[in-house]
Image (cartoon, rainbow, N blue to C red):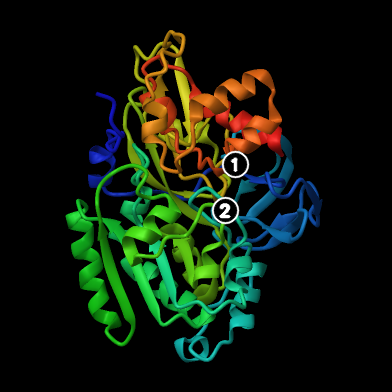
Amino acid sequence: MISKARKVSDYKQLTKELPTLRYVDPEHVHINLTTARCENYTLSKEKGDYVKMGEIIGERSGGFFKQPIYSTVSGYVKDKRTMIDSTGVEVECLTIRNDFQNTYCTTITDRPDNYIQNMTQDEMVEIIKQKAIVGLGGSGFPSYVKLSTDKDIHTVVINAVECEPYLSSDYRLIKDNPEEVFHGLEYIMQATGAKRGVIAIKKTKKELIEVLENELKRFKDKDISIAKLKDYYPQGWENETFENAIGIKVPVGTLPMEYGILGFNVSTTAAIYDAIKHNTPILKRHLTVNGDAIKFPQNIRVRVGTSVEDLIKLSDGYIEDAGEIEIIIGGPMMGKSVPSDNVVVTPTTTSVLVLKNVDYKEEPCVRCGSCVYSCPVDISPVQIMNAVKRSDKKSLEDLQANKCIECGLCAYVCTSKIHVTDYVREGKKLIR
């Protein structure tokens, strides 16, 4: 009998238990000048110029916003080169040679707690905007846009579910620095006027729940709680998390702020803390290197701009009998496959998966219905696939292909090994 898929093997055990390796001093960093949201840029530095860590070196521009570009090391500007970013697309990067002095820009200074307590929403939003803080769970959406809402926000939900297989970078961030998550949540609540804060996490992460509960004792004057959710995929999908953590169902395609809710990823929350408390942009981030084709899977605290090639070397390289290798940036369900390790770590890079390539023979669809039963947004992936093959835009709209959250479950459960998710992605593009 066909049933709804709820469990996905997670392969997290090894990396989440190992101490986080600190690798913050690569010889060179490559600062991405463009992103999927910002395709244009201007530079204020030239080859040979000296730059400090946290210094503005240019500006990106998108359709509705601009974003400062920061150096993540102190050193000397070299040249520009093309690399691949976390979305799997080619981006232009500025290479900076690290002088290993870690000389901070003079703008990076701590703010006193009593000063922060009196800051207004506008002041906090301006800091988040100027420090180019974006959604670090992979979305890359500017965080200042969320924080500048004029809606009546009653609850802020911090998503600590991390349900993608192989990924454990958020796990290690919470375990190593729980105070950053709580202070970040505190700042978000202050900026938005929210009275309630919730940290949502899978109930099976008992060790991490203990860490959070111990840290929570320091915030007794705040209405902050920990929601322990069931362990299934895709529990970390924002709408699913909201419904299970606070009991509010947000319809697909509707903004959570319309229901008085704002959601942030764990890493984004910590970045907001760093920006407001330390006045720093995103200089470093936690990142998972994992997979069956890498010798030493681990979590690493890396400098933004580090090359994936360097990280693979740091993980003792590829295993001897790896054969053909598949590199995925992000998780195996929602990440992007890239053609080489010429990839740069950007603020939104959550992980690097190095896997043995397995060629599955795609068979004809047997109409088993697995993809339909398992779809968390109740659309029909197989019918969308057929509409894509016909280039039938009207049917794609009627089938609500745009509701797809690209969780990958339809491809995961397909008995014919069809890459159904890719067809649905293509359907969304056709509609746009």
**259, above or below 101, in the image:** below
Residue at the image point whose x is 38% and y is 74% from the top: 197
Mark count: 2
Whether residue 177 is visible to the viewer of this picture, yes or no, is: no
Q: Residues within 10 Å of mark 2 (few under 14, many from 20)?
A: few
- Name the residue at 59% across, 78% down: 124
Give the secondary structure at mark 1: helix
Image quarter hosting the N terminus: top left
Image position, residue 21 (x, y; %): 35, 47
- Classify mark 2: helix, strand or loop: loop
Residue 297, visible in the rendered structure:
yes
Give the residue type that dot 1 points to. Answer: Asn
x then y, percent, for residue 109: 56, 77
Q: Which residue is mark 2?
A: 253
Cα distance, mark 2 to mark 1? 9 Å
Q: Are marks 2 and 1 in contact (CB under 8 Å)?
A: yes
Q: Residues within 10 Å of mark 1 (few under 14, many from 20)?
A: many
Q: Is residue 185 above or below residue 24?
A: below
For badge 2, the amino acid type reads Gly
User: Which one is in front, 96 or 125?
Assistant: 125
Q: Which residue is mark 1?
A: 402
